């Protein structure tokens, strides 16, 4: 499949959500929410694994991977793991070195499934005050996020 | 006695900014108030200026005559002469009780009350523009006798409008001896619309000349309200360098619509520096809407910089209408630029900023930052606090308290910058900017926001 037809099969970023959601559930991120605000941004997906006590944020993008990476770097402040998810053709074409350098994971999405091209590394930058607030939003903990 | 350059002159944009002005009044070099603000609430503006002690700080009243000229529609890029940007949708008189849905159907597009009042007070040609609902044109220049009257009215407005308010207001009357007086008055001015540069430049130069010739007891300043494209035009620059001082004004305030210090190319910044440097050998030069780069140009003759309280270091002639209230971002002093909280916070670890003390040493040690970030670095987040401003709001917006923190921090930082710019040499300024680029500029979330630093260094050292 070429990058062009690959992107065309996902017409909206939201189309990437279902396969990515399944991928996250397979990794035990059973608590999931979408469109959580982080300052002026909105995290497309945010999840929590009770098994591993890890949070995950995912930025979905059809194109413009550098913009996705910029946002992902910010989400490292509020999530243990951060991924960028893109259509497979797009994800395979980009230079993944910079993702590895910053510990941001990269997911390649194709119809119905999702493959991890670069694993996310637990963020050393995560701030507990943000993380706890998102856990509360997911219904975990008793942190007042108001 | 005039303060040492650069001066920081704060533009009061609304009465909601009163608190900032009053708290910082002893540290500001001056205040500038738009005539439209004055006409919107004359008593409140007069009392604000009295309370701000503008008798000692320099006061300027911007006559805002450009608002009645031609402008470029920011949406279409086309020249407009319908004055629409100083109009608003208004409910016709006699229908105030109607329900909202019904009111919306019956609103009419009318001149804002403040601009209408300004036009009526100043008279020709502004009142004629309002009557015809059509902008003043460059043909103005052909009416020499009336130009003299227009200039006189605009000077009179700046010198007497405030006095009249004090005389007529029962509560202010007793304070007339303490009434602030303008440090200088502006000649009327219009935007030099780029498709008709020569004609509009002629108009502005004639207005400066006519106003200077009035022989007022206070200094006369001109405003060069042009376009960033003019900065890039060597012919226009040369004409300005020769013609502006010849008009007889003792000062000029530069305002190039579309000129943004942070994004301007090296060529444009160099042209700006050259213009400041050239004009400053003969008259005082200030930036009407300037920022940190403007402050550094004090080493080349820039007398001072004016800007708003939360933003306004760069301003287009016609503001973009209909945008939601912008977030007041945190001003990051080492790179002299505003950025979002997470972009900055993401860099702390790599820069060894782990405690409040580190923050105060490496980022900002102003009173606001010391107060907000007192026990934990996590408190930095409160500069970006968000909330749903209405029960029906779909998106988060910055809380008023966070916006206030950012504004106060910005103003204190700016005053601090003014003080150290006064002390440092050009080389030392360049070194500080280089340090900002070398530390903050290499952080992955800030890299794309710091390219201006080395451009500024290059222009300052050229």
Image (cartoon, coloured by chain):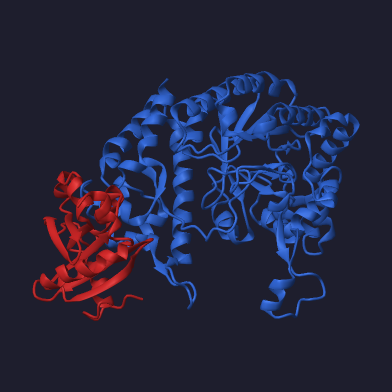
Chain colours: A red, B blue
Residue B142 visible, this orientation: yes
User: Compared to B259, does A73 lie above or below?
Assistant: below
The residue located at (84%, 38%) in the rendering is B150
Across and down, in percent, residue A68 comes to: 28, 53
Across and down, in percent, residue B190 comes to: 72, 38
Front residue of this view, candidates B73 and B295: B73
For the N terminus of chain B, give its image quadrant. top right
Front residue of this view, candidates A62 and B362: A62
Within the image, what quadrant is residue B406 found in?
Answer: bottom left
B184 with respect to B133 (left or right): left
The residue located at (34%, 29%) in the rendering is B431
Residue B1 visible, this orientation: no
Numbered label tally: 0
User: Compared to B336, does A144 lie above or below?
Assistant: below
For the C terminus of chain B, give its image quadrant. top left
Front residue of this view, candidates B445 and B223: B445
B219 with respect to A53 (left or right): right
User: Compared to B389, does B21 lie above or below?
Assistant: above
Across and down, in percent, residue B11 comes to: 61, 48
Across and down, in percent, residue B100 comes to: 67, 77
B103 with respect to B14 (left or right): right
Within the image, what quadrant is residue B80 found in?
Answer: top right
The residue located at (88%, 29%) in the rendering is B144
User: Of all residues shown, which one is farthest toward the right?
Assistant: B145
């Amino acid at each position: 499949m070429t990058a062009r037809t690959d992107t065309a099969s996902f017409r909206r970023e939201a189309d990437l959500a279902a396969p990515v959601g399944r991928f996250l559930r397979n990794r035990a991120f059973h608590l999931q929410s979408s469109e959580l605000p982080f300052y002026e941004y909105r995290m497309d997906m945010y999840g929590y694994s009770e098994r591993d006590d890890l949070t995950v944020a995912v930025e979905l993008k059809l194109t413009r991977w550098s913009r996705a990476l910029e946002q992902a770097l910010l989400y490292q402040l509020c999530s243990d793991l951060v991924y960028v998810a893109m259509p497979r053709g797009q994800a395979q074409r980009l230079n993944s070195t910079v993702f590895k350098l910053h510990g941001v994971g990269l997911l390649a999405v194709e119809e119905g499934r999702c493959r991890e091209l670069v694993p996310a590394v637990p963020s050393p930058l995560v701030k507990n005050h943000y993380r706890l607030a998102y856990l509360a939003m997911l219904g975990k903990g008793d942190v007042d996020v108001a | 006695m005039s303060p040492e350059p650069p001066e920081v002159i704060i533009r009061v944009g609304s009465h909601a900014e009163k608190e900032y002005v009053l708290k910082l009044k002893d540290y500001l070099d001056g205040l500038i108030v738009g005539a439209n603000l004055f006409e919107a609430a004359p008593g409140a503006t007069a009392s604000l200026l009295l309370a701000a002690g503008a008798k000692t700080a320099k006061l300027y009243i911007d006559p805002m005559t450009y608002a009645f000229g031609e402008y470029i529609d920011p949406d279409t890029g086309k020249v407009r002469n319908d004055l629409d940007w100083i109009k608003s949708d208004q409910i016709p008189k006699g229908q105030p009780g109607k329900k909202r849905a019904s009111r919306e159907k019956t609103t009419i597009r009318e001149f804002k009350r403040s601009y209408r009042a300004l036009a009526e007070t100043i008279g020709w040609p502004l009142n004629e523009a309002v009557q015809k609902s059509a902008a003043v044109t460059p043909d103005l220049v052909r009416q020499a006798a009336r130009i003299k009257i227009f200039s006189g009215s605009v000077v009179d407005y700046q010198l007497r409008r405030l006095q009249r308010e004090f005389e007529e207001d029962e509560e202010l009357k007793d304070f007339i001896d303490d009434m602030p007086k303008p440090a200088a008055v502006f000649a009327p001015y219009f935007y030099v619309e780029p498709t008709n540069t020569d004609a509009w430049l002629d108009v502005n130069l004639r207005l400066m000349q006519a106003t200077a010739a009035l022989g007022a007891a206070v200094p006369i300043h001109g405003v060069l309200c042009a376009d960033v494209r003019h900065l890039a035009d060597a012919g226009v620059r040369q004409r300005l360098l020769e013609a502006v001082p010849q008009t007889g004004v003792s000062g000029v305030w530069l305002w190039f619509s579309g000129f943004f210090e942070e994004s301007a190319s090296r060529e444009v910044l160099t042209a700006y520096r050259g213009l400041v440097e050239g004009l400053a050998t003969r008259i005082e030069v200030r930036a009407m809407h300037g920022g940190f780069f403007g402050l550094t140009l004090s080493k080349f003759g820039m007398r001072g910089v004016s800007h708003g309280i939360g933003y306004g270091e760069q301003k287009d002639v016609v503001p973009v209408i209909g945008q939601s209230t912008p977030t007041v971002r945190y001003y990051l002093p080492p790179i002299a630029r505003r950025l979002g909280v997470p972009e900055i916070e993401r860099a702390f670890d790599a820069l060894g900023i782990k405690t409040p003390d580190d923050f105060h040493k490496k980022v900002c040690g102003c009173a606001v930052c010391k107060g907000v970030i007192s026990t934990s670095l996590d408190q930095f987040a409160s500069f970006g606090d968000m909330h749903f401003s209405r029960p029906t709001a779909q998106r988060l917006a910055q809380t008023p308290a966070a916006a206030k923190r950012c504004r106060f921090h910005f103003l204190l930082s700016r005053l601090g910058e003014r003080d150290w710019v006064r002390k440092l040499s050009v080389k030392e300024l360049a070194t500080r900017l280089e340090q900002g680029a070398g530390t903050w500029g290499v952080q992955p979330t800030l890299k794309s926001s710091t390219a201006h630093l080395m451009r500024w260094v290059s222009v300052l050292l050229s």
